[in-house]
Image (cartoon, rainbow, N blue to C red):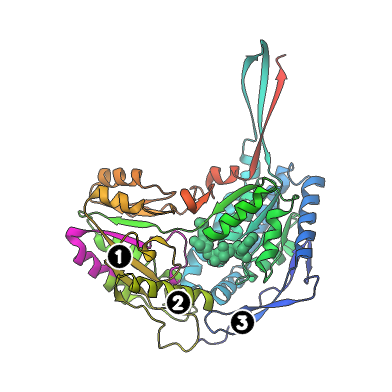
Amino acid sequence: MTEAHDVAGETRLLIDGKLVEASSGDTFANIDPTTEEVLGDTADGTGQDMSSAIGAARRAFDETTWSTDHELRRRCLKQLHAACAAHIEELRAVTVAEVGSPIALTYANQVDLPIDDLGYWVDKPVSYQYEHWLPERDVFGQPQRRLVRREAVGVVGAITPWNFPLNLNLAKLGPALAAGNTVVLKPAPDTPWSATVLGRIIAEETDIPAGVVNVVASSDHMVGEVLTTDPRVDMITFTGSTATGRRIMAKGAETVKKVFLELGGKSANIVLDDAPDPGGAIAVSAIGVCTHAGQGCAITTRLLVPRSRYDEFLGLADAMMASVTYGDPWDAGNLQGPLISAKQRDRVMGYIEKGKAEGARLVRGGSRPAQFDKGFFVEPTLFADVDSKATIAQEEIFGPVLVVIPFEDDDDAVRIANDSIYGLSGAVTSASEERAMAVARRVRTGTLMVNGGFWNSPDVPFGGYRQSGVGRENGVEGFEEYLETKAIALPAR
Ligand code: NAD
């Protein structure tokens, strides 16, 4: 279905400033989710490679001026930003090919925006106030001067998923490096090139010192786990599933690592009965859930609609999902491409079967599209009359599947929205901003759209309540995640 595209990628790992093959000499295949064919190979990093990368990051942190030379970091981040911009078409091609992301989305938050957003971190090393004095105070009867100082945490293990890989690799490298840490980046096995190409750019086109950034791809998740147990690693920054996040937290406990987690979501879109533009409000979920085949953590995959306007709002959602064009991600007209893998496609199909078995009404889709003989596609799928306790209303599906749940009044909408182990994002729409804000304040979630507002920006903290995560990415809050706090006391002069 798709014509051949020239996507080279990068096979090599980056360890201690050198682009290298795996110590075993092994490689693993990078599969194109659209064609199911092999795009190329990537060095299959081993536990030994991971250990070498951690050793290099440790040395670079302990023995170079990286963490204290703020001007060096500013200059290196500026180079990295410019180099990524210069390689934007290569990164776009890699993203469409290995992620199966619709090319249209690469002009937004898959490629162009994250490269743009990297610019947000360039001046942070020099503009941030690392020290401040507290007022003098008597302690044990003696007047004291007290200095509060922020310092880099140390060696950061960055573990990323496959759905927005370039975005998340940069969202971790930007603040971690700006704050003065050294990093070992471990990408998902499904999307290694979104990291290894960055590794090559860093090695060849920036002055980032050897060991400051290491990139270790591997087909084996357990190679990533080495980061979570190695005592030389000070912090893990992880984006991925809640199940893996729990395991990382438990493993990190052995060496009391700082653990930063961006996990799954099952966000609710509450459209109140007086919504002035219900179409626009419903599109956030109905179109959103099809975009990139629903493989986004912050998508509002639960659409909560008032019982009084249930049929009308459900009809709007159905009509919108019917209009979604999907298929070849290289076609700029397609909003939805394939799922990342056969495993993920089968997982989504399993949820659809479960939804039917538990009594939800299948309004649209629910199958693998017959028109494609290759690729991990699933039809845009809409379920109505879903009980908030049903599996498809509770668990993250990570596919193009929307569930519609009716509510009685504002209190009931808030109750249903909060009836979740997650708390990542959400939306509220009403003709009355006051009413929408009253509901928004009661929803237990890290980000919210009110009346169509967008929170997506590098200066806005993003992250989850409850099992959607620990900590915040972006903004000053996101920068400070990568800093330790030291208090120094001196006798008053
Ligand atoms: P995943 O948890 O399976 O894998 C994520 C990464 O963790 C991969 O690099 C994987 O190799 C690694 N990993 C797996 N087991 C590990 C272990 N025991 N120790 C160390 N590393 C390990 O997630 P996924 O399937 O790649 O991504 C989809 C998930 O990511 C979804 O749940 C989605 O909601 C979540 N996500 C969250 C955000 C957010 O910001 N909250 C953003 C994007 C994706």
Relative depth, front residue between 481 and 349:
349
* Residue at the disc numbered 3: 6
Circle nearer the N terminus (2, 3)? 3
Going by the numbered disc 3, the residue's amino acid type is Asp
- The answer to which quarter of the image holds residue 42 is bottom right
Report the magenta residues as a range: 293-317
The first of marks 1 and 3 along the sequence is 3
Q: Earlier in the sequence, mark 2 or mark 1?
A: 2
Tell me residue 53's x, y (percent): 77, 59
User: Looking at the picture, how far across and down is residue 414, in whole percent?
Assistant: 31, 49
Quadrant housing residue 393: bottom left
| Magenta span includes 98 | no
Is there a contact, CB below 8 Å, between mark 2 and mark 3? no
Q: Is residue 311 above or below residue 27?
A: above
Residue kind at label 2, given as amino acid type: Ala
Residue occupying image coordinates x 62% and y 15% = 137
Residue beneath disc 1? 386
What is the three-letter code of the residue carrying label 1? Val
* Side of 282 where 134 appears, left or right: right
Q: Please tell me whether mark 1 or mark 3 is closer to you in this view.
A: 1
> Where's ligand 1: which quadrant?
bottom right
Give me the disc on residue 166. Answer: none
Name the spot of residue 177 as percent of width and height, x first: 67, 50
**Residue shown at 51%/69% (left/top)?**
106
Query: Disc 2 designates what residue?
Result: 332
Q: Is residue 48 left or right of residue 459?
A: right
Vertical placement of 422 versus 286: above or below? above
